[in-house]
Amino acid sequence: MLKHRGFPGRMTGTDFQFVIRRANHKEGVSKLIKRERFKDRKNVDRAADTAFMAALWNHFGEEPFERGNLDAGRLSWLFGREVVAAEDPFDPCSYEALLKIDVKRAQASFPEVFAADAPPPPMDDWDDGEDD
C-alpha cells in the first residue's frame, strides 16, 4: 500500500481521519462506495468533506493518483462525483486503484477550495514513523 507522504492525516482539531496507518490484512481492503450526501448533514461533516477535497486538490491536482492509504470512508463521501475512477476496469477494493478529481464537479461542489484566494488545507500529519 502506497503511503502518501505529506498528505494530512486528519482534519485539524477533529477525529475525522484522511489516511489509514496500515493495510487491513485481516479483513481485506475496504470497498469504495458512493455515499449519498443529504442536505441535513452536520456542518462539521460538510467541513470535513471540504478539507479533504482541499487536501486532495493541493496534493494531487488534476493528475490521477493511487488510492494507497487514503481513508475509504472519507473517499466514499466524494467517490462517484468529485472523485472518479481513472482506470477501466476499476477495482473498488484495491489500494492500487487509480482515482482522479473531476475538476468541474469538484469546483461546483466546493467552490471555496478552488477560489484564487483559497488557503492551503491545515496540516495535521499522523506520520508516526511506521513503514509497512
Image (cartoon, grey):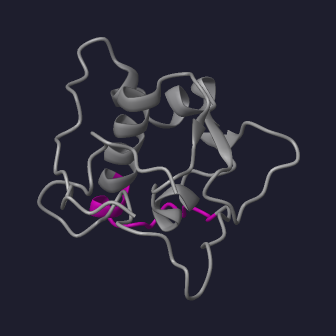
Q: Position of residue 3 (x, y in %)?
A: 41, 50
Magenta stretch: dominant SS?
loop
Check the image and name the residue furthest to the left. 13
The image quarter in which residue 118 lies:
top left
User: Depth check: 125 or 33 in front?
Assistant: 125
Residue 78 point in image, percent of width and height: 56, 51
Q: Is residue 30 above or below residue 50?
A: below
User: Does 91 appear above or below 53?
Assistant: below
Tell me: residue 29, above or below residue 80: below
Residue at horizontal 72 percent and vertical 61 percent from the top: 92
Q: Quadrant of the C terminus?
A: bottom left
Q: Is residue 123 above or below residue 125?
A: above
Q: Nearer the viewer, residue 119 or 43?
A: 119
Place of residue 90 in the rendered image (x, y in percent of width and height, measured from the top left): 80, 50
Q: Residue at x 22, y 28 (%)?
A: 120
- Asked if the magenta segment contains residue 85, the reply would be no
Q: Residue lying furthest front in this view?
A: 132
Would you say 89 lies left or right of 80 here?
right
Q: Is residue 33 left or right of residue 12?
A: right
Q: Name the image quarter holding residue 43.
A: bottom left
> Does 65 sit left or right of 33 as displayed?
left
Instruction: Give 36 or 66, whichever is nearer the viewer.
Output: 66
What's drawn in magenta, residue-wise? Answer: 35-46
Which residue is the extreme one toward the bottom?
26
Q: Residue shown at 45%/57% (left/top)? A: 69
Please state the horizontal and vertical placement of residue 125, each as a whole percent of the image.
19, 51
